[in-house]
Amino acid sequence: MITVLQTQPQNTVQDLGRFGYRELGVGTAGAMDDVALQVGNILLGNQHDAAALEIQTFPFVVSFDEARFVAVTGANAKLDLSGQSFLPWTLKRVEAGQTLTICRPTVGARMYLCVQGGIDVPAILGSRSTQLRGGFGGFEGRFLENGDVLKTGDGPIRRSLYGALPPGQRLEQLDPEKGIVGLRVIPATDYFRFPEHARHRFWNTGWKISPQSNRTGYRLKGEQVLPDKAVELRSYGVVPGIIQVPPSGEPIVQMADANTAGGYLRIASVIEADLWRLGQAPVGARIRFIPCDHAEGIAAMKAVTSYLCDLMQITGLYQGGTQHAPTGCFLTL
């Protein structure tokens, strides 16, 4: 078991999300950086969608009641295991009684504490993710609190310690300039309701993630992007990645806890393959949108899948399951 010794609001139990219930008003929830969560689970030999702790406020401190393997992925932060430092994106054995401290990241926004066997909380509607709006899933449907005790499941015992190269080092670099996060987006249904000068501004503004951002949506600050004329739309289905433009003219990107329906104009949508990049962009970061078509979006998702599959094959080597594993995303410690 794991005992939470120090935490702040916003830290929750998440897996890859809850699918198939949006028509009932139940969003997917799930990890803001699903790639980081999957990498941690692959390193541990867990099911790729095993539940982990998503940490976005720091410091975060837990103690372990029994020996376990862990992997901490996501952002770049100092990790301290009872006085011993170790690196993110690596497999680490924790002994009973040891304390793990995850400090504030120097790069990125969220860390994922993945544990051998996963976090053992009840699966509700097919997922262990915390649904904050509905108050269910995860650990009692809420943020973690000091003193919470979390059970872990059964998982394989690793015979070697190793790590993965982060996706930012393996996947295509998109940053248009230093200090700006590039995101590939596809124009959406209402794109041509905006005049040419507004569309130009949308692509060329270095949008700033405002403090009014959370797991539901990222509100962006910058020059207004307004349509030719005011338009009222009927509500439509909403999924993570959709970029809506409210009457203020400042876009909102729907995130993991996205609303299930909405009526603001849809100017574009972040491709699925880049949502993890946005999930690691902290408040105050600047982002820029890069035009993309459907074919490019599919190709980008194939690159993410290939990265994860390579890692699965390589870690299989250490279980005797793979004779010829690809290289390039793996590090032996």
Image: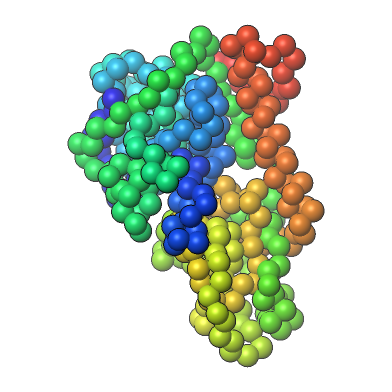
Q: Is residue 70 above or below residue 19?
A: above
105 vs 195, left or right, is: left
Asked whether residue 140 is in view, the answer is yes
Task: Give the residue furthest to the left.
Answer: 147
- Residue nearer the viewer, 81 or 73: 73
- For the image, the number of numbered tags is 0
Quadrant assignment, res 201: bottom right
- Residue nearer the viewer, 245 or 322: 322
Q: Is residue 156 above or below residue 329?
A: above
Tell me how the rendering is colored. rainbow
Q: Residue at x 68, y 37 (%)?
A: 305
Q: Residue at x 71, y 83 (%)?
A: 195
| Quadrant of the snapshot with the C terminus | top right
Q: Residue at x 67, y 76 (%)?
A: 190
Image position, residue 70 (x, y; %) = 42, 24
Image position, residue 310 (x, y; %) = 68, 27
Q: Is residue 131 above or below residue 164?
A: below
Asked whether residue 90 is in view, the answer is no
Q: Residue at x 35, y 31 (%)?
A: 120
| Quadrant of the snapshot with the N terminus | top left
Image position, residue 64 (x, y; %) = 29, 23
139 vs 234, left or right, is: left
Image position, residue 2 (x, y; %) = 29, 28
Q: Is residue 293 above or below residue 150?
A: below
